[in-house]
Amino acid sequence: MRLSRQSSPQRTGVVVVSADAEFGSAVRATFGASKAIDLTLVAGTLAEQADTLDLGAATVVVVDLDAGSEEEMAALARLMARVGQWPPVIAVTQSFDEGVARTLLQMRIADFLVKPVQPVDLVRACARVAKGPGSGAEPADAKIYTFLPAVGGAGVTTLAVQTAMLLLNSGGPRVKPSTCLVDLDFQHGAVADYLDLEPRLNLAEIEPRPDRLDRQLLEVMLSYHASGLAVVAAPNRPAEMRSFDPDMVTRLLDLVSSNFEYVVFDMPRTWFAWTDSVLLGSNKLYIVSETTVPALRHAKQLVAAVKERLDEGPKPQVIVNRFTQRLFESGLRLSDIQHTLGDSFVSAIPNDYALVREAIDRGVPLDEVKPGNKITAQLKKLVIEPPKADGKPASLLTKLKFARAG
């Protein structure tokens, strides 16, 4: 059941639950002096307060809890079941790891902070998740489309770029939904090169303090294509083989999914500690294969692996890219692909290497080179026309939307 917003149109109701006296004092000092904020500080653990907490006047709820306590996490689950999507809930924890991120994502927490929390970070988090006073609007989840390669060189980046462009233009020429394309291949990513953009994501600046990543810092690290598409991409580091802190990655994705209507992820083939979180938070998960027997085998194996690891996640669907079928010639036919992949097969994208190469060289979408081309037409049937999305809305990935870790 969703609780109604009863705060004064001129004031923001912040409810904070904490058994930490020092944290409570910091919160009181941070919010107490503001005439625009109605602060309610509830002393005690979430396990003690979750079932009786009065949230009728809350615009945002901050819960300070021990993420390692089963009792505390169970209390948080009960609280989230009570509030639904409003008011948004921010979790403050002493520690944070992939398992915590995954759980918070499944609960659809609006945001998270790790102690010690700087007052300015708490204020920014509350301001970000709370809608403007009196707007009457409730937070909406981003729709997240994820492209995962079954083999190297399958054309994932091309499909991710074109999908992002289609989503950007899905509202017509006058209204463009806010859309962000995120290149998660931090070592060999090609999105910025495909769009002729300067990659601006500085991972070295974020990693030491992922909690300081906010909308203002994200804006500095966004690149924008002439079409209006926002891009998150880091400079290539081909000689560096390293895995980044899952906390940093999920925090970044949480923020992106909180600020855009559509988000498209271009995934690396390598499976990292944060990969599960990304896939779990997706509405649509596409595994991209090419038209060869080994590639189809890899795709089938990857579908099985994803289902085994993420039984509650989105249904993985296989796109076979660069498909060509000519009469009276040998090679894989569409019926062979359907037989091999079964229900997981969703689409075969036509092959037009010359068109794709020209678009990449010019840094423009395919439709700008050749309007109405077959590749874009097939993708449009796949990502635009179906009215419903598979999987759960992402809210720590659209809220952890990502640690929403998911």
Image (cartoon, rainbow, N blue to C red):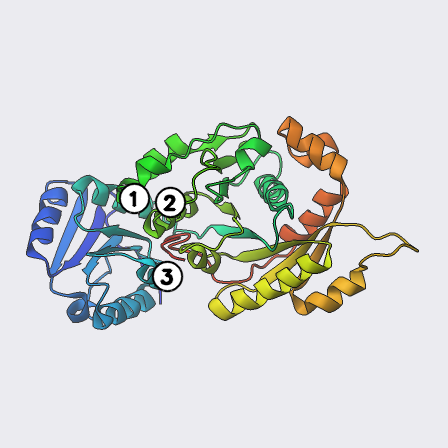
Q: Name the residue that disc number 3 marks.
A: 102
* Vertical order, 293 against 236 (above or below): below
In-image side of 128 versus 196 (left or right): left
Label 2 vs 3, first from the N-terminus: 3
Q: Name the residue that disc number 2 marks.
A: 252
Residue 102 seen in the figure: yes
Q: Amino acid at mark 2?
A: Leu
Q: Position of residue 194 (x, y in %)?
A: 59, 33
Tag 3: Cα neighbours inside 10 Å, few (<14), some, or many (≥20)?
Answer: many
> Which residue appears at 7% of the width and 52% of the height?
22
* Vertical order, 358 against 296 (above or below): above
Q: Name the residue that disc number 1 marks.
A: 210
Label 1 vs 3, first from the N-terminus: 3
Quarter of the view holding residue 174: top right
Tell me the distance, in whole angstroms, between the alpha carbons under discs 1 and 3: 17 Å
Residue 58 seen in the figure: no
Front-most of residues 43 and 52: 43
Q: Position of residue 56 (x, y in %)?
A: 24, 60
Tell me the distance, in whole angstroms, between the alpha carbons under discs 2 and 3: 15 Å
Decide: marks 2, 1 in contact (CB < 8 A)?
Answer: yes
Which quarter of the figure is the N terminus placed in? bottom left
